[in-house]
Each structure stands twice: as C-alpha cells, then as structure tokens.
Image: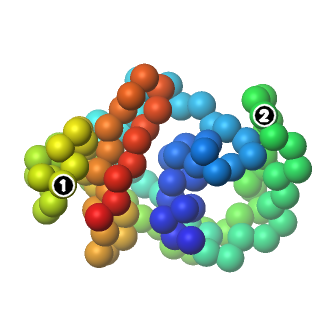
C-alpha cells in the first residue's frame, strides 16, 4: 500500500487509477532533487467517482502524520544499478527499497528492487 500511495502521489498510478494525473517531463525530479511526500496510511472520505481528464479531487481532508524525503541520484549510484540498465535515476522508496526511474515521453517508468 505504501508503494502504491507513493506512486500515486508522483503520478505513476495512471495505469491503475480511474483518473489520470498529467505531469510534464519538465516537472519530473532530476538527480540532486529532493522529493518530499506526505503519507496518510489510513485515508478516509476520498471518493473517486469520475474518471478521465479534467477531474479535480479534494485531498484537503487528508491528515499526513508521516513525511518522507527522498534524494534522487543518478541510477549508477544505486545498489543494484546493473539490474536496471535503462534507468536514469534512483531514489529510496522506503528504508529497504530503491526505486529506479526513467522518463519516456511524458511517462515516468518505475522499477523497484
């Protein structure tokens, strides 16, 4: 669940979510950037009734008692970079997991190890 929530927050969930978030490539994190996320492990009152473009969700009722910061590095600096040869960046997903990312057009592709 934590991995899915992180992916959703940075816009990776367009494949599994009924709504799509569009983040242009120019806004994607780069090596040296710090991505700060707030995590609500028990969200309530979120209803995603509609799907498709131009939807607006109100996340104001979320309480995020947990926050994470992840410094993005070049993929070559990751512990298992040889497994993700096409990755451009790596960032910690949690204390035991690294995510490896690359952009393809306007998509951010994630590999987790």
Residue 46: image x %, image y %?
80, 61
Distance, label 1 to label 2, CA atoms, is: 35 Å
Query: Dot 2: what SS?
Result: loop
Name the quadrant containing residue 11: top right
Give the residue at mark 2: 52
* Sequence-earlier tag: 1 or 2: 2
Residue 15: image x %, image y %?
60, 45
Residue 72: image x %, image y %?
27, 48
Up/down of 27 relative to 20, above or below: above
Give the residue at mark 1: 83
For the rendered model, the colour scheme is rainbow
Residue 51: image x %, image y %?
81, 40
Q: Residue at x 31, y 69 (%)?
A: 97
User: In the drawing, does residue 25 fall left or right of residue 92?
Assistant: right
User: In the drawing, does residue 40 fall left or right of residue 43?
Assistant: left
Could you tell me if residue 24 is visible in this image?
yes
In this view, the residue farthest toward the right is 49
Specify few, some or many for label 2: CA neighbours under 10 Å numbering under 14, 14-19, or 20 or more.
few
Q: Which numbered circle lies on residue 41?
A: none
Q: Residue at x 36, y 32 (%)?
A: 103
Q: Residue at x 46, y 32 (%)?
A: 107
Up/down of 4 relative to 100, above or below: below
User: Which quadrant: the N terminus?
Assistant: bottom right
Query: Dot 1: what SS?
Result: helix
């Amino acid at each position: 669940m934590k991995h899915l929530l992180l992916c959703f927050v940075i816009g990776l969930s367009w494949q599994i979510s009924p709504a799509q978030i569009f983040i242009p490539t120019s806004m994607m994190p780069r090596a040296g950037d710090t991505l700060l996320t707030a995590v609500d492990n028990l969200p309530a009152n979120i209803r995603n009734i509609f799907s498709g473009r131009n939807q607006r969700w109100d996340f104001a009722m979320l309480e995020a008692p947990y926050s994470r910061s992840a410094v993005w590095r070049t993929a070559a600096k990751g512990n298992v970079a040889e497994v993700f040869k096409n990755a451009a960046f790596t960032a910690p997903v949690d204390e035991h997991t690294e995510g490896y990312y690359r952009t393809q057009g306007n998509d951010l592709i994630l590999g987790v190890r």
